[in-house]
Amino acid sequence: MDFIDGVAEQLSATTFQHLNHYRHQVFVEMLGWELDTPEGIEQDQFDHQDTIYVVAKNQHDHICGCARLLPTTQPYLLEEVFPELLNGLACPKQADIWELSRFAAVDFDNHQEAPTQLMSKQALSLLNASITCAKKHGAKRLISVSPLGIERMLRHAGFRHHRAGPPKIINGYALFACYIDLM
């Protein structure tokens, strides 16, 4: 797997277009999220000129993973959409805490099922690439809204992490907010 990262302007126009299509395939078509997005692409209000993307490509140069990184000093998903996952605590607003969102490691060329992708080497490689990218931009911790399966992956892989609040069922999914220490 090869990784590239940067803001949309730093990615080629083709890569950025394929990234938005890949996100639609994963989050809308495969996972069934009901998102208000144009047909065939997935973007939201957190995809702006300063958003940093991490893109994984397979041996065929097709996207097989992605992640989105946002500093918590500007609006982000947990703060704006899922603040209840912090159980009444204030949302972090620090330059060294970044949000990891739109994380997916599904290689459609390989046809693996989604549950095995959560524990795959590709998912761990993508997480490590995302951490490296976040550190490069000054992050010391990540915070993420994640399904509970991610907690098992983090524990199994030895990442220092902890819940920011108890899990909650939202739209039929067991989600939780999680800090990942990057030290």
Image (cartoon, rainbow, N blue to C red):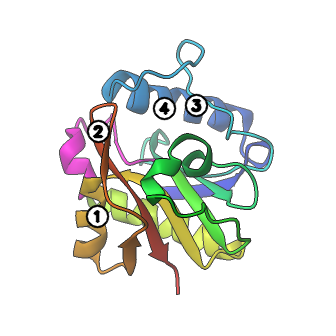
Sequence-wise, the earlier of marks 4 and 2 is: 4
Q: Which residue is mark 2?
A: 173
Judging depth in this view, the residue of 112 and 48 nearest the camera is 48
x, y (%) of residue 33?
39, 26
Residue 6 appearing in the image: yes
Residues at discs 4 and 3 in contact (Cβ within 8 Å): yes
Q: CA distance from mark 2 to mark 1?
A: 14 Å
x, y (%) of residue 39?
55, 12
Amino acid type for the residue under numbered disc 4: Tyr
Which label lies toward us, 1 or 4?
A: 1
Amino acid type for the residue under numbered disc 2: Tyr
Identify the element where label 3 is drawn: helix
x, y (%) of residue 2?
50, 57
Residue 102 appearing in the image: no
Q: Residue at x 40, y 65 (%)?
A: 125
Does 104 appear in magenta? yes
Which label lies toward us, 2 or 1?
A: 2
Residue sticking out furthest to the front: 88
Q: Which residue is mark 4?
A: 22
Amino acid type for the residue under numbered disc 1: Glu
Sequence-wise, the earlier of marks 1 and 3 is: 3
The magenta-colored residue range is 102-119
User: Seen in the image, is 43 located left or right of residue 177?
Assistant: right
The crowding category of the residue bearing disc 3, from other C-alpha atoms within 10 Å (few below 14, some 14 to 19, many at least 20), is some
Which label lies toward us, 3 or 2?
A: 2
Which label lies toward us, 4 or 2?
A: 2
Sequence-wise, the earlier of marks 2 and 1 is: 1
- Check the image and report above or below for 146 versus 110: below
Q: CA distance from mark 3 to mark 2?
A: 23 Å
